[in-house]
Image: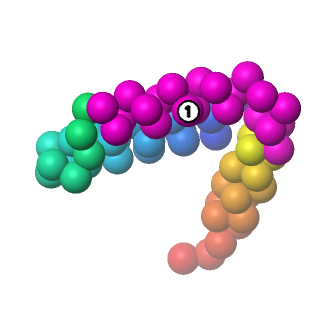
Amino acid sequence: MAVSISVVLLMLILAVIFLRNGGLKISHALVCVLLGFFLAGTSMAPTIHDGVGATADLVSGLDP
């Protein structure tokens, strides 16, 4: 659960930065949000969730 919240916050921060810098338009952001909602309802959702979790485990295991 903590990984999901962290990823959502990271994506939200990146979207705000892109919107402010002019690199992302509102229409593009809405399309990305809709894509995320539709992907969450597909059979690919568990695979994506497992991949994000594995990546988070890998990154958290790295020593600086």
Q: Is 30 in front, or is 50?
A: 30
In the rendered image, the vertical position of residue 58 relative to residue 26, given as above or below: below
**Outermost residue, bottom side:** 64
The segment highlighted magenta reads 27-47
Residue at label 1? 35
- Frontmost residue, 2 versus 18: 18
Percent x, y of residue 14? 34, 47
Give above or below for 53 relative to 62. above
Looking at the image, residue 17 sits to the left or right of residue 53; the answer is left
In percent of width and height, residue 48 lies at 74, 44
Residue 35: within the magenta? yes
Residue positioned 26% across, 32% down in the render: 26
Residue 12 percent across, percent down from the top left? 38, 36
Quadrant of the frame with the C terminus: bottom right
Say if 35 sits above or below 55 in the image: above
Q: Residue at x 62, y 35 (%)?
A: 4
Observer able to see residue 9: no
Q: Which amino acid is tagged 1?
A: Leu
